[in-house]
Amino acid sequence: MSTRIETEIARPDTVTIEVDGRPLSAHPGESLAVALLAAGIRALRASPRAGGARGAFCFMGACQECVVTVDGRRVTSCLEPVRAGMRVRLGLG
Amino acid sequence: MSACPAYDCAVVGGGVMGCTTALWLARAGMRVVLLDRGSLCREASGVNAGTLTMQMTRAALIPYAMRGWELWRTTADWLGMDVGTRVLDGLSVAYTEAEVGMLEARASSRRAAGAPVELVDAARARDIEPGLGDGVRLAGFCPVDGFVVAYLTGRAYRGALLAAGATLQEGRAVTGIDPVDGGFALGTADGGRVEARRVVLAGGVWIQEMASWLGVRLPIQCLVNQLVVTERLPPVMRTILGVANGKLSLKQFDNGTVLVGGGWQGIGRGDPRDGGAEIVPENVIGNLQLAVHAVPRLRDARVLRVWLGYEAETADAMPVVGRLPGFDDAWVIGSVHSGYTSGPYIGRLLADAILERELERPLFDPGRLAGR
Amino acid sequence: MPDAIDLLVLGAGPAGAAAALAAAEHGARTVMVDEALAPGGQVYRAPPMDHRQLGQRALEPEHRDGEALRRRLQCSGVEVATRHRVWSLLPGFRVHAIGPAGHRAWVARAVVLATGTTERVVPFPGWTTPGVIGLAAATILLKSQGAVPGERVVVAGCGPLLAAVGAGLVKAGRAPVAVVDLAGRGEWLRALPAMAARPDLVRRGLGWLAALRRAGVPLLSGHGVVAVEGDTRVTAVRIAPVASDGTPRAERVARRLEADALVIGHGLVPATEATRLLEADHRFVADAGGWIPVLDDDCATSVAGLFAAGDGSGLAGAAAARLQGEIAGLAAARHLGQLDEGRYQHTVAPLRQGLARARRFGQAMARLTAPRPAMVGTIAADTVVCRCEDVTRAEIETAIASGAREMNQLKAWTRCGMGPCQGRMCAETAASLLARHVGGREAAGQWTARAPLRPLPLADMVGEFGYDDIPMPEPAPP
């Protein structure tokens, strides 16, 4: 079962993005954090001192837990819309 | 004045200078009270870039800075706490003809004063700092630079002063000082009064005001330095990096954050000492451009915080350390341009002077700048 | 060169949008800035571009109101600068932002701050595990993104969002494993008189509860989360009944719920970074969410020309925010000389009446949502308080024991609050911990607000430049 709600929403056709070198299908415009969640990717980065796994927490751009690198730029994935071909690097290890 | 004042010495101002002086006086057995209107090392001493540098220390101060550097390196021994000091290679780079000229002049005067500064070409500079971008014409290299984690110093001094038996009065603003028979009476904002046989004015940019309480005119200029810190990054640099004109100080802490300084100025509202100060966004951007020019990988970082720190400067950009003119028992210490490196040593020197011990090096007579 | 404008509105939620529309209607040259892709704030957050909402989803009040608001803005004279991050706000209302096309700067004659809130979660073991998200976060997922946080979701915390999120999950076909409410039934009963002010919302709430009941979702009132299990993802949530002081009793775990996500919230905190940067006076009002700017009846702060509205100026809910925003916009127009006193008073009088009603309801909800004061005391020593810097409660307590007496000092000594969230996630907890030792929140103080208001990429700050473009100051002394 997907974490996307499939009823009552007509989404644009999926596009392919690249996450740590692997292709991933996602709908353009949806939040990158949501696309990663739908793909079962929850741990997005490691905490600085303890090295604990962290994932999206506030989904409104405040907590910074979902920061990943997109095309060389560090962004909050919760506010970053999916675009075809975007290259995502997670912040683990 | 009561027959016997409560304290042998009152130190007004709890920055690195005041704290060090108070610490050594207390350790020598004096009854010391240290007053600060805020918390220890929360102004210039706690919010500055923490750079230990010979290349940006004025030549006449090099012998003091070398000793200060040694003290910073060993805070665990004499201050009871590691304040994150790291010894790093220091580089000062020149990108233009004019900067090459500046670099050569600065390096030679500092070498003459005893700092191990040598000039190296761009290739060697790149070996020393692989993070450097293009365009370097010449670099000054000094292997005894480094940094202190400035925001930890208050915690360290607090513990040391209490252990030495000093009385700490944080959050207590002194509003005036009167010479009285056998010493001084300090009035405080809470309406209190503290009496001491001697007084040390260690108020940084506020020394000018403190001296005026005792009728001495001691002009101190107040710079408003902007500082910027990034989020944690993978290693992008390994040196203390500056530019020959002095307008950049760049370092990466152990935790990965990069601090960008260099004395780009914010702006005061009137006299910043009275009315506060604000950042100048264009100067934040300029400072960051210079940082990115020096270390291009910083482009990938994000800025977390911009803040301001006051820096005291005298007309000759040299410290004021010694007796307040006209007083046997009122002392002043501060205003060392780029003086963080030498701070603890100069503080100890002043304590030696007050304790009438033989001085390793001369102080910096405030009389040269003072009037009445 | 900065653009000279009449009014800058920061935040495009219900309060900001209402302020901008009201001021623009009276001729104020108004720019409204927000970092989101579209106006609406969190409550009216727009779905992603080209994701069409159909059927019942399209009829949800927040969706309809949000779409209507966006249409109104489009037809108004308001310049809506979305995808812009304000990074510096200076006295004299000099505002610097970075948008898709680079730097923007404005000099405004008046400012309305409508910066909303951040969510508060009182730390517990495992709260940093991926799969634990905020209640407000879950509403964004459900309503705007059309997503659920997991397959087996526990919903926990306090306040009306619990039922809203629970019912939203039921509707999405993923009925939650349980809804866990810190409040007992008595607390809800005590809120009833104030709730009578908004029978429509009460009906809606009862509808949520009915949906949960129909779906057979266990509703555990008077219970709280004591721990989350799992390393790289949530595997289970441990639940315990709360004691009389409102804190879950970790030693009495009642249930262990297998789950892959936990949605949890303990209320909202007004985002006051902007009012603090502009040096407005603040006061601490626990029921309003914490530190809030001091406002008069015209939504004016202590700084002339600076107004604040919405939950960012004190929690009162979306309906109150809209009315407050409108008052702030009108007051700004009056300040700008574009609305005379008589017309101003005439227009705001009914708004104030509506606001009083909306507030009664909103503040009752905020009280139900507020964390129990004793909860911070139960945080375990090795639990992380500052997520960004991994600072534990024990490290904070050690710093306090060695003499830290106010928030900025505590930050310097521990790095708590120094990370990328800029203290938004830990300030409340750290301040509450410190307050226990120094005689209250006022004594503990607040972290000094600093630019930038959000972490900013250096690439955006510096742009493309050559060495000669750098506006180099005079060299340092030789």
Image (tube, coloured by chain):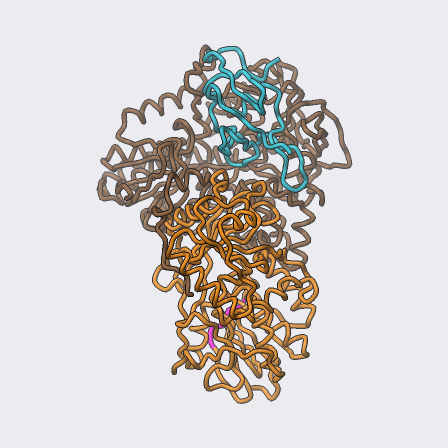
Chain colours: A cyan, B orange, C brown
Q: Is residue C60 visible?
A: yes
**Vertical side of B180 occupied by C213: above or below:** above
User: Viewer-proximal residue, C423 or C377?
Assistant: C423
Residue C389, horizontal then vertical, whole percent: 61, 43
User: Viewer-proximal residue, C276 or C36?
Assistant: C36
Residue B152, horizontal then vertical, whole percent: 60, 57
Report if residue C381 lies within the magenta region: no
Residue C232, horizontal then vertical, whole percent: 68, 29
**Vertical side of C16 occupied by C413: above or below:** below
The residue furthest right is C251
User: Viewer-proximal residue, C294 or C244?
Assistant: C294
**Vertical side of C160 occupied by A29: above or below:** above
Q: Magenta region, mostly helix, strand or loop?
A: strand
Residue at the image position 68 percent from the left and 31 percent from the top: C223
Q: Which residues are magenta?
A: B172-176
Residue at the image position 27 percent from the left and 41 percent from the top: C3
Residue C302, horizontal then vertical, whole percent: 37, 51
Q: Is residue C354 visible?
A: no
